[in-house]
Image: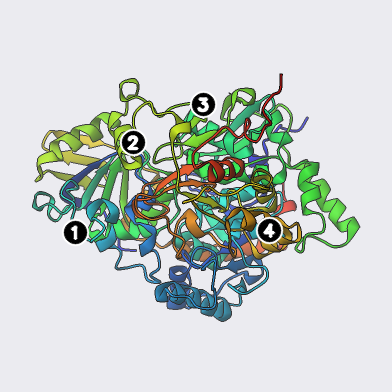
Amino acid sequence: MEAIEKHTGTVYPLGRDNVDTDQIIPKQFLKRVERTGFGEFVFYNWRFDDEGNPKEDFEIDSPKYEGASILIAGENFGCGSSREHAPWALLDYGFKVIIAPSFADIFYSNAFKNGIIVIEAEEDKVKEWQEKAQNGDFMLAVDLVEQTVTSDSGVYKFDIPSYHKEKLINGWDDISLTLQLEDKIKQYEESGGRMGIS
Amino acid sequence: MAEKKTIIDKIWENHVVHREEGQPDLIYIDQHLVHEVTSPQAFEGLRLTGRKVRRPDLTFATMDHNVPTKNRENIRDEISAKQMDALKKNCKDFGVKLADMFHPDQGIVHVIGPQLGLTQPGKTIVCGDSHTSTHGAFGALAFGIGTSEVEHVLATQTLYGDRPKTMNVKVNGPLGAGVTAKDLILAIIAKFGVKFGTGYVVEYTGEAVRDLTMEGRMTVCNMSIEGGARAGLISPDEKTVDFLTGRRYVPKDEEEFNALAGDWLALATDEGAEYDKTIEIDATQIEPQVSWGTNPGMVVPISGTTPSLDSVENKDEIGRALTYMDLEENQPITSIEIDHVFIGSCTNSRVLDLQRAAKIIEGKKVKAGIQAMVVPGSFLVKQEAEALGLDEVFKSAGFEWRDAGCSACLGMNDDIIPAGGRCASTSNRNFEGRQGNGARTHLVSPEMAAAAAIEGRFVDVREYGKEPQIS
C-alpha cells in the first residue's frame, strides 16, 4: 500500500444518501480476477444507458469535475455488499479521498485497506462542501497528519481512528504486521482455541 | 458472582489473540468460507508474496455466485467460467477443500455451512460476503469481510477488529399466524432504518425470536447487514443443538457431542447482561411485509401504500425510488402487478422455505405471463425437497425448478430480470439494478412470493386460500 499524508484535489459532489456498493460497481463487472481495471465501470448504471451511452443527468464525467479526486457523498455510503471491488473501482477512477457524514462498516474498512482516506465529517460541513462543488472547480486540501480539511472558507478538523491513520501514513500492510505476531497466534492455537479461554 | 456477559462479549473475549492499548484486537477466526467472486485477488496476493494458507483445515470453498442454475455443463459466459477455474486452481494450489459446481455439497455458502455443521455456536466465522451474518442464527459471531481481509485470514487465520458495540433487538410477543421470519426482519429494518446497526453486533431476543425455527433465525440474521449491522446473532438453545445433531462436521461421538453442546448452551447471554443499546419492536403488530422502493428500509405492510412525498423528509431519495420502481405516491401495495417471481437466495432457499411456498402453490397455477422460478439453496436442499415431492408441486404449477446457486438474487449468472421487469423476490436486496439493469425488485417472504405468482399481484397471504365463509 502506498503511503499517503496529504492530498489536494477537485471535489465531485455525488450527494445522495445510502449509496450501495451495487451502484458503485454493478455485479456484471465483478468477474475480473485482478484488482485493477474497475474504474471505467464505477457508477456504471447511473453513468450509462442500456446502449452504453453517457446519461446527461449524472455529471461525474462532466468537464467541470475533470480530474476530481475527492468524492463527497451522503449518509451511509457504501452500504450493502462487502465487495472490495467498490473501493477498487473508486480508486481506479481517481478518487483518493471520500468524505461523507457516515459510512457502512465493511466499506469503511475496505477503503482504508486500499489507501483511500475516508473522512467522516459533520453533516452540515459535508452539505456546505457539496453545495460549493456544484459548479465545479472546488478544491479541498486534506492533511491526514493534522487531521484537517482546508477549503476557501477555513480549516475543518476531523476525527479518524488512530490505527487507520498510522497505517495510511506509513503505507503499512496488515499481513506483514500480523505475521510478526506469529508466536501469539501459535500460542492461541496450542491453547485449544475458542472454548479454551474465557 | 461472575460478571454478566452477552454472547457477543463471550465469543469476542474467547478469540482475542493479541490486545494492545489504542489498537484494534487481533482475533482468531475458526471458520473461513470462500467463494469464487471475492477470493481470486486474495489468493493472487498470497502468490505474489510467497505466502501459504495458514489453516486449510479451517477453510472451505464453494462456487455459488456465478454458477448457472441449468445446463451447468455448458457455461456460456467465459468470464464466469474463468473466475470459477481460478477458484479451482487456487484451492488445488493452496490445499483448500472445494465443493465445486458438480460436487454434491455445492450450494450457497450460507446454506451449506449450517447444513454440513461447519457453522457452530461460539465460532468466529468469516466470508468475503456480507450475508455471512446468516450463521449468527447458531450463536456464532459471523460477519462479511472484504478481499484484503480474506487474504489476511488466509495468511494468518486472524483479523483485526474493534471490540464490537452490542445491541439488543428485543422482539416482544409472538408473531401472528401467517407472519414469517422474513416479515419480522423486514419490519425491523423498516422501523429502525438501513443503518440502525452500523458499528454494532446485534443480538435478536424475545419471544418471537425464540419461537422461530433455525431456518427462520437464519432468515433474520441474514438480513442484519441490511440494517447496517455487520453481524447479527441469536443465543443458542435446544433448537440449535437439535439442528446440528448428526451433521457431518460435528463430533460423531455422543459423549463428545453432548459436552460440546453443553459449552454451546453456556454461551447464551447471561440473564441481566447489559448491552450498549436496546431497541424494541412489538411482534403482534407485524403484518406480511412488501418492499416498495430501492433499499431494504423502504418496506410497508401488505395493507399499506407507497409513501406520499409530502409526508417524508428525504423527498429526493423517496422520489427517485418511486420513479425507478415506476410507482405512484400513495399506491396500494395490493395494486402492484408483478411479472417475475424468484424463490431462492441465502435468505429464503432452505427446505422449510420451499415447503411453505409449496403449501400455497399446491393445486394452483402460476398466472399466465408470469415467469416464476425456484432455486434451491444447495444440492442437498434440492435432493431433500425432491424426496418430499416439492419439485412436482412447483413444476406442475408452472414454476421452473433449477439447480443450486445465488441466481437471480444478484444476477451474476444468466438468471436476470429484464429491464422494466417487476419481481416478487424472496432475496435480500432491492437496490437499483440488483436483479438486472432496470429491473424492479419487491422483497417478500416465500409465502407472499408464492401467492403473488398465482394472483399476479401482491395479496395478503393470511387471507389467501381461505374458503369463502358460508353464513
Residue with the mark numbered 4 = B392
Distance CA(mark 3)–CA(mark 2): 18 Å
- Which quadrant would the N terminus of chain A be assigned to in this image? bottom left
Closer to the eye: label 3 or 1: 3
Amino acid at dot 3:
Ser
Q: Earlier in the sequence, mark 3 or mark 2?
A: 3
| Relative to B287, B336 lies left or right | left
Helix, strand or loop under label 2: helix
Using the image, name the chain to which the residue with label 2 belongs. Answer: B
Q: Could you tell me if the residues under marks 1 and 2 are in contact, i.e. CB atoms within 8 Å?
A: no
Q: Could you tell me if the residues under marks 3 and 1 are in contact, i.e. CB atoms within 8 Å?
A: no
Using the image, name the chain to which the residue with label 4 belongs. Answer: B
Q: Are marks 4 and 2 on the same chain?
A: yes
Q: Earlier in the sequence, mark 4 or mark 3?
A: 3
Distance CA(mark 3)–CA(mark 1): 41 Å
Q: Could you tell me if the residues under marks 4 and 3 are in contact, i.e. CB atoms within 8 Å?
A: no
Using the image, name the chain to which the residue with label 3 belongs. Answer: B
Question: Residue B1 versus residue A112: which sits nearer the camera?
Answer: A112
Amino acid at dot 4:
Glu
Residue B96, quarter of picture:
bottom right
The disc at residue B303 is: 3
Q: Residues within 10 Å of mark 4 (few under 14, many from 20)?
A: some
Distance CA(mark 4)–CA(mark 2): 38 Å
Evaluate whether residue B163 shows in this view.
no
Residue with the mark numbered 2 = B322
Q: Are marks 4 and 3 on the same chain?
A: yes
Residue with the mark numbered 1 = A53
Q: Residues within 10 Å of mark 2 (few under 14, many from 20)?
A: many
Display colour scheme: rainbow
